[in-house]
Image (tube, rainbow, N blue to C red):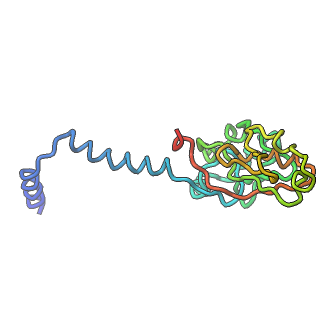
Amino acid sequence: MAEKSEKYYQAVMEHKQISRRGLFRGLLSGAQKTHQQAVIESFTRLVARPPSAVDESSLSKLCDGCGLCEQACPQHVISMIAGKPELHLDCNFCTHCGECQRACPTLALSNNCASTGVIPEFSSACRRLLYGYCDMCAEECPQQAISLEEKRPSALSDKCNGCGQCRTACPMGAISYTLHPIIPITAIE
């Protein structure tokens, strides 16, 4: 039976000439397309995650729940919930210092995207809406991602990294967060 297999493959190879260049080009073109698709695809987090956290499916596989990122965070905004890191920006903000990423031994925080996955929304309790003169959120935003052109402030999603400084600065507590899709940095460049 081994002779039949060998003869079959010899017959096939006699009719089809494949150069080494053609072989490698064919193999690598498929891998290149897959890599490009993986880089460009955006993803939405299920909850706010530390900056540079990988997408949700990879996080569930990579994160072992050790809690080193939580211990390393100088702002104390990372909590381990159900064995996975979550970002809680209710009382403080993320400085994007990178300590959580450096502490992670499993590469669960190794994404090239610095967004936390949240973007601010402004409620009707906003002082600017009520009285017309507040701009504290925009002043505190390190990314200059809050537009005050309208009466209601709005976040510029292409600039916002979800750090939470605007929410901490708001004296009215008028800022909440919504999850939004994240596009990896390599897709933008």
Image location (x, y in percent) of residue 167: 84, 49
Which quadrant of the figure has residue 76?
top right
Q: Looking at the image, which residue is at 77% across and 37% down? A: 142
Image location (x, y in percent) of residue 81: 75, 58
Image location (x, y in percent) of residue 11: 6, 55
Q: Looking at the image, which residue is at 89% across and 59% down? A: 125
Pick whichever, 11 or 166, lies toward us: 166
Pick whichever, 171 or 1, lies toward us: 171
Image location (x, y in percent) of residue 137: 84, 45
Q: Looking at the image, which residue is at 59% across and 41% down? A: 112
The residue most toward the bottom is: 1
- Position of 180 with respect to 40 (left or right) is right
- The vertical placement of 69 against 45, above or below, is above
Quadrant in which the N terminus is drawn: bottom left
Pick whichever, 108 or 114, lies toward us: 114
- The vertical placement of 34 against 125, above or below, is above
